[in-house]
């Protein structure tokens, strides 16, 4: 089947894994087309509850979240203004936008070296829960942190790390031609042979042989 | 039931969530007691395959892994030597130890700002897959990066971020008294009211009301 014939890119987007992995991980991908349909509060709550129970260095829980729902929250435009233009273009059609932040210091006032890493752990949980609930998540590094700090009064001891759209998968036809191509292209990853080593760097692990 | 009467802390460790979340997220926790039982290569492969399909900024895939299996790999002692002493004490009984690393630059040679965050996303996937396969994972920030760089020839354009033990849950009685207490204590997290905001920082989101 030609990619261009897909209305729903779900099949082509499923990870082509070398061994079976959990559906909630294989089916996760980052779309740009969204249905104009609010996300149920109950599902949002489950996502943030999932994030809440992630592991973190010394249980510091670096993560904080600013949530804006397009259909309900006055802060929607402020949240959207925190994205670089190229992301704003498609993200404005999503029903939910989240800004993520990470503590720069531990509770004892020391530098929190793993803060961004630990936020990533929480977002991994959030993404798995969202996928289980039939939702998609698109995380973006392309943001304007100073806009976010000013508009949402983010204190100096937090970094603003990403913006995240969440919603139900939409029709790729709603996207510009360039975006649509990417929406319908298969996902790709570096092979494990270049990622997983044993003994010394760049030496293939025996479990791959 | 008293915590001290548990041989298997699994029940007490399950996250007490305010709303239901995926079992592979609620059941994940970071033990220090391990069975002396190797982890099947097939399960290790699934974990790293799960990590491989995480999201990352511009699909940069910051993550690299150095795997050492206690029963099989000569590099086991080198891996163990990369932990701070307090972690080495209990981690030496685990069957698997992984050092994680994150690229400091993108493929185009620019600073890779989200590298640690994206490694966290991959580790979130790995942890969920491990939990699904009946395994436990304990990630540690308490490592000696210089030891790791020297012993495993890690290039300068990678940060060494964490060490991770993986295995089957062991008997808490094998731990020192202080460690055993923590092994049998319920897990705790900051409430969502202090984590999830809408409109401005520290303002509780309406979805929590």
Image (cartoon, coloured by chain):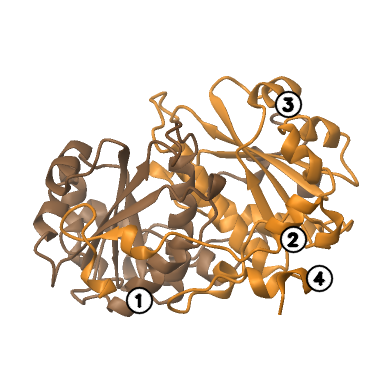
Chain colours: A brown, B orange
Q: Position of residue A30 (x, y in %)?
A: 37, 58
- The image quadrant of residue B209 is bottom left
- Which residue does the image show at 77% across and 60% down from the upper left? B42
Question: Which of the chains bears the disc numbered 3?
Answer: B
Image-based side of A153 in relation to A41, left or right = left
Frontmost of labels 3 and 4 is 4
Image-based side of A106 in relation to B37, left or right = left
In front of the other: A154 or A179: A154
User: Would you place residue A40 above or below residue B52 in this image?
Assistant: below
- Which residue does the image show at 26% across and 35% down from the upper left? A156
Please check whether the numbered discs 1 and 3 fall on a single chain: no
- N-terminal of the pair, mark 4 or mark 2, is 4
Q: How far apart in space, not on screen, are marks 1 and 3 (Cα)? A: 44 Å
Question: Which of the chains bears the disc numbered 1?
Answer: A
Residue pointed to by mark 4: B7
Residue pointed to by mark 3: B152
Residue pointed to by mark 2: B43
- The reply to whether residue A204 is visible in this rendering is no
- N-terminal of the pair, mark 2 or mark 3, is 2
Frontmost of labels 1 and 3 is 1
Please check whether the numbered discs 2 and 3 fall on a single chain: yes
Please check whether the numbered discs 2 and 1 fall on a single chain: no
- Circles 2 and 3, Cβ within 8 Å, touching? The answer is no
Element at label 3: helix
Q: How far apart in space, not on screen, are marks 1 and 4 (Cα)? A: 35 Å
- Circles 3 and 4, Cβ within 8 Å, touching? The answer is no
């Amino acid at each position: 089947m030609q990619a261009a014939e897909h209305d729903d890119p779900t099949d082509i987007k499923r990870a082509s894994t070398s061994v079976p992995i959990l559906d909630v991980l294989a089916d996760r991908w980052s779309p740009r087309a969204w249905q104009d349909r609010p996300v149920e509060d109950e599902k949002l709550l489950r996502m943030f509850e999932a994030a809440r129970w992630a592991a973190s260095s010394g249980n510091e829980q670096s993560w904080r979240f600013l949530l804006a729902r397009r259909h309900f929250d006055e802060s929607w435009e402020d949240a959207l203004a925190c994205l670089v233009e190229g992301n704003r273009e498609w993200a404005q059609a999503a029903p939910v936008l989240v800004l993520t932040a990470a503590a720069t210091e531990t509770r004892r006032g020391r530098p929190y070296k793993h803060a961004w890493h630990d936020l990533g752990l929480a977002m991994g949980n959030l993404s798995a829960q969202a996928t289980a609930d039939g939702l998609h998540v698109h995380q973006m590094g392309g943001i304007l942190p100073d806009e976010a700090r000013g508009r949402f009064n983010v204190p100096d001891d937090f970094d603003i790390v990403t913006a995240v759209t969440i919603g139900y998968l939409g029709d790729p036809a709603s996207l510009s031609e360039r975006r649509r191509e990417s929406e319908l292209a298969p996902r790709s990853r570096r092979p494990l042979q270049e990622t997983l080593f044993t003994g010394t760097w760049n030496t293939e692990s025996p479990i791959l042989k």
